[in-house]
C-alpha cells in the first residue's frame, strides 16, 4: 500500500554503507567493516540500511550482504541491477526491500534513473518475482509524471526519485536550474502519491538539501550514503547521522 498518510508520519532515513566497503577494498583486508557501520548507523537513528551489490563487486561483497541480513535489526534495502545474477542473490537472501537501479560498468556511481518506459518488458518479470517472494520493490527513477505512470503499470509499490540533478545544481550555484528541478521533484512526488505510489528520494543529498526536500510532506524515506560516510571522516558516523536526522525532522516540521 502506498504511504498516502506520509504527512503525519516521521520521515524515514535509510543509510547506504557502500563506501565504507570502498575504503576497505582500497587496502584489502577486513577494515573498516561495513556491517559495523550499519550497526552503528542503526544505533544513531537509521531506520534502514541500504547496500548495493554491483556486478564487479567494487565495494559491497556477497559476504557483506549475507552478514547484513543476519546481523542487523532494521530492514535491509538491497540496491541492485535487474540482472539474472542479482535477482538470484535477492531471492536467496530475502531482504526487506530491493531497489532496482540502472548499472553501467564504467560509471562511478548510479547516474540517473531507470528507463522504466523502454525497459518495461525487461523489468516486469523481475519485479513480479521479487514481489512474489515478499520483497518490497522500489524503482530508482527520474521525477516526471510519465515515468510515474510507467512505474505504476509495472506494479511496483514504491518509487525513489533521483535527486542528483537538483543537488548538483544547488552545489554548483545554478539557482534557476535548482529551483526548476526542485519543482519537478515536488510535482512528481505529489503525482506519484496521487496514483497510489509510496515516494522515496536519494542521490547527492546533504544536510541543506535534505532539510529542504523534507518540507515536501509526501516523501516517506530518504536514502543517503556518500555524504554521510564522507562527513563521518570529520565528525564520526553517529554524529553525522544524528545531524541528518535533526535536519530532516526540522524540514518535515516546516
Image (spheres, grey):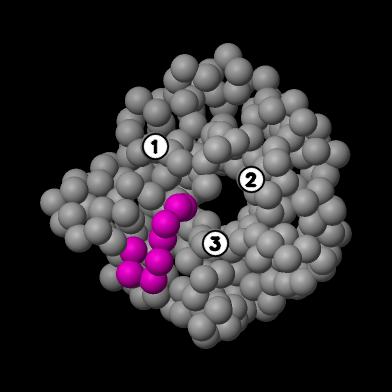
Q: Quadrant of residue 31?
A: bottom right
Up-down relation of residue 66 to residue 184 (above or below): below
Residue under the point 63% across and 45% down: 79
Circle 3 residues within 10 Å: few <14, some 14–19, many ≥20: many
Labels 2 & 3 near each other (Cβ < 8 A): no
N-terminal label among 3 and 1? 1
Residue under the point 46% across and 41% down: 111
Q: CA distance from mark 2 to mark 1?
A: 16 Å
Residue 178 shows in the view = yes
Residue under the point 43% across and 39% down: 112
The span picked out in magenta is 202-209
Circle 2 residues within 10 Å: few <14, some 14–19, many ≥20: many
Q: Residue under circle 2?
A: 79
Up-down relation of residue 30 to residue 63 (above or below): below
Residue 104 position within the rendered picture, expressed as x and y whole percent measured from the top left: 56, 34
SS assignment at label 2: strand
Q: CA distance from mark 2 to mark 3?
A: 12 Å
Please tell me the numbered disc located at residue 225.
Answer: 3
Residue 137 shows in the view = no
Up-down relation of residue 74 to residue 231 (above or below): above
Amino acid at each position: 500500500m502506498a504511504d498516502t498518510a506520509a504527512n503525519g508520519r516521521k520521515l524515514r532515513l535509510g543509510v547506504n554503507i557502500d563506501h565504507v566497503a570502498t575504503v576497505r577494498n582500497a587496502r584489502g583486508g577486513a577494515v573498516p567493516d561495513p556491517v559495523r557501520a550499519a550497526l552503528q548507523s542503526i544505533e544513531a537513528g537509521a531506520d534502514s540500511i541500504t547496500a548495493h551489490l554491483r556486478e564487479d563487486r567494487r565495494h559491497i561483497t556477497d559476504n557483506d550482504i549475507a552478514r547484513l541480513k543476519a546481523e542487523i535489526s532494521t530492514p535491509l534495502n538491497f540496491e541492485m541491477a535487474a540482472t539474472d545474477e542479482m535477482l538470484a542473490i535477492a531471492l536467496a537472501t530475502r531482504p526487506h526491500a530491493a531497489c532496482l537501479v540502472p548499472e553501467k560498468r564504467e560509471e562511478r556511481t548510479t547516474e540517473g534513473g531507470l528507463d522504466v518506459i523502454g525497459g518495461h518488458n525487461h523489468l516486469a518479470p523481475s519485479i513480479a518475482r521479487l514481489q512474489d517472494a515478499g520483497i518490497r520493490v522500489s524503482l530508482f527513477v527520474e521525477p516526471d509524471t510519465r515515468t510515474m505512470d510507467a512505474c505504476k503499470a509495472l506494479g511496483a509499490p514504491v518509487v525513489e526519485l533521483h535527486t542528483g540533478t537538483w543537488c548538483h545544481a544547488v552545489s554548483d550555484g545554478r539557482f534557476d536550474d535548482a529551483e526548476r528541478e526542485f519543482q519537478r521533484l515536488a510535482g512528481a512526488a505529489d503525482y506519484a502519491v496521487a496514483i497510489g505510489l509510496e515516494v522515496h528520494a536519494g542521490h547527492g543529498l546533504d544536510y541543506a538539501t535534505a532539510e529542504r526536500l523534507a518540507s515536501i510532506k509526501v516523501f516517506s524515506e530518504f536514502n543517503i550514503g556518500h555524504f554521510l560516510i564522507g562527513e563521518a571522516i570529520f565528525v564520526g558516523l553517529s554524529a553525522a547521522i544524528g545531524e541528518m536526522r535533526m535536519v530532516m525532522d526540522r524540514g518535515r516540521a516546516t
